[in-house]
Image (spheres, helix red, strand yellow):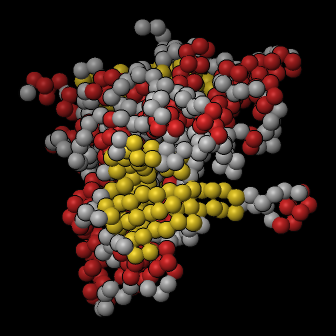
Amino acid sequence: MSAPLLEVRNLRVEFPTRRGTLVALDDISFSIAPGEILGVVGESGAGKSLTGSAIIGLLDPPGRVAAGQILFQGRRIDNLPYEQMRAVRGRHIGAIFQDPLTSLNPLYTIGRQLTETIQTHLNVSNDEARKRAIRLLQETGIPAAAARIDQFPHQFSGGMRQRVVIALALAAEPQLIVADEPTTALDVSIQAQIISLLKRLCKQHGAAVMLVTHDMGVIAETCDRVAVMYAGRIAEIGPVHDVIHSPAHPYTVGLMGSIPAMDEERERLLQIDGAMPRLTNIPPGCAFNPRCPRVFDRCRIERPDLLAAGNTRAACWLHAVDMKVAA
Amino acid sequence: MSALVQVRDLSKVFNVSAPWLNRVIERRPRQFVHAVDGVSFSIESGKTLALVGESGCGKSTVARLLVGLHEPTRGTVSYDGTDATAALRSPSGRELRRRMQMIFQDPYASLNPRWKVLDIVAEPLREHALSTTEKELQERVGELLSSVGLAPADMEKFPHQFSGGQRQRISIARALATQPEFLVCDEPTSALDVSVQAQVLNIMKALQRERGLTYLFISHNLAVVRHVSDQVGVMYLGRLVELSDKAQLFARPRHPYTRMLLDAIPDIHMSGRSRTPVQGEVPNPLNPPSGCSFHPRCPHANERCKAERPALLSINGVFVACHAVEEGRI
């Protein structure tokens, strides 16, 4: 395997509050290879967006990286001073957010926002920047790009705005794009367009993607590998096909079973009782133990690390080596 | 079985004109949105009809028209044989309101944050004077909460102490308080996470079985619709384009828009499959296309589709509004 583009090692993000420190992300480790698409999936509050924010260095205060390292092309980026991180962001790591309306400045034309981004990161003339901007808009499938470049964000529809945001993210040819729920605010028919566009463009530009979403369907058709998050930790990580068809962690099993499927008829959906714990009272041992149908004593005491389980790795004691010997 | 709810030619036009002074100075015409345009369907007692469509297709407006939150511009809703549109406006509408209730999309907005759960769930009971004493009221609320999988002791808490899924259960308990026969559910699970969505959908199905409830289920998620419904209506720009049995619709979608929607769903069991992305977007409802409003995005459109608006016709037991299907072109 080639050297990873991005490597996250034992990342821990904390929010100091008046009532004590909340650990929002704990011991997160994963890597993304050049050109790879990694999906990060989980329910609200699992910490998937936070992982993305930590990587692009945009944690909202008082949140901070308390431990661990984030390495980009072998260089640590989690402790860079603000100005240096600004140079990395956009140039090497692009970002796409959920709501295209709030990620565009309503007072500037699309063209101005694009050329500004291009000229911040690349040393090109005004003319060249504008040409590049038009080419980017054409690539993202905006009709009559040369005319629409001088329009304002409000003159674009939701799907078109998200195309502009993708163009912005790709403007400086970054090697990694962090896409945080890029299609959640869009209708299904537009969603399909945007996902295939993102997939195609990142392949053409050779950019790797970290795709954060709660939609398992989007993950299934887009990603190479997927990380399933639960209560601030990675519950399972592995190739998409294996995680979907032979999930190893009981949480992933429950998550897959709770999605109504298009190709089978079921009277009842599999349900995981209860809800994800709040950050203020994450249970000891495995965070999933109060909801787990296969819980045993060890789960309540000791916290599992990611263990090899078939083709994937799961943080579950069922896959401990001595368990398998016993079974 | 006879139809419990019958909707005939239901239409709602919203006046979205600029203020009078702006119209005069800027010489702008009045503007109207035909949010719902000639929709007809019926729901049999104990069954579920699902309405699907993308944002702005008018599905939520239909829901609101049915329970009387909007007044229809044209058309009628009849409930159990009586004209509901007229009855809901008259003093006798009280009884009708007891029999139909609504569950809203956002459980954070639909529960009063300053009321205890007891007061929230008891409000319909008090309004309709269904419980006489305070003790009886509390017992009833306790029962309702247990029927949706919450503890009776939860009635002393406030909405902020509950998660999204639990709040949606409180809204269901409130809707069930008057022992209605008909529930209008406007995207009841789209604000919830999948595992919580599964819990809520399971509760809704169990309640339907136990109490013989009839549902109108509004959703944009076809997989959810497939799970809960008996019949499915597909809406596009205020009109019903296809209405058929669930099995039929998913096995053999007829209208090109329905096919497009089915193609657009990401499916977890098809990793690596790329969807056929549909061209174009939903047109501006202020200025809908002539003829069939889907024709600019339709691969089968011809001159007739551009000029003439197709009616919802019964073709092989399925209601479809499409010239191409009618002529046997597709």
Residue toward you, A210 or B89? B89
Q: Is B98 placed above or below B270 here?
A: below
How many numbered callouts?
A: 0
Task: Identify which residue is drawn at 75% across, 41% down.
Answer: A155
Q: Is B42 placed above or below A55 here?
A: below
x and y percentages locating residue A40 in the rendered image: 44, 32
Relative placement, left or right, of A51 versus A269 is right
Single out the residue that lies furthest toward the bottom. Answer: B133
x and y percentages locating residue B37 in the rendered image: 57, 56
x and y percentages locating residue A246 in the rendered image: 25, 27
Q: Quadrant of residue A1?
A: top left
x and y percentages locating residue B297 in the rendered image: 59, 33
Task: Identify which residue is drawn at 66% across, 43% down.
Answer: B290
Q: Is A95 placed above or below A34 here?
A: below
Single out the residue that lies furthest toward the front. Answer: B327
Task: Identify which residue is drawn at 53% across, 22% down.
Answer: A199
Single out the residue that lies furthest toward the top. Answer: A2
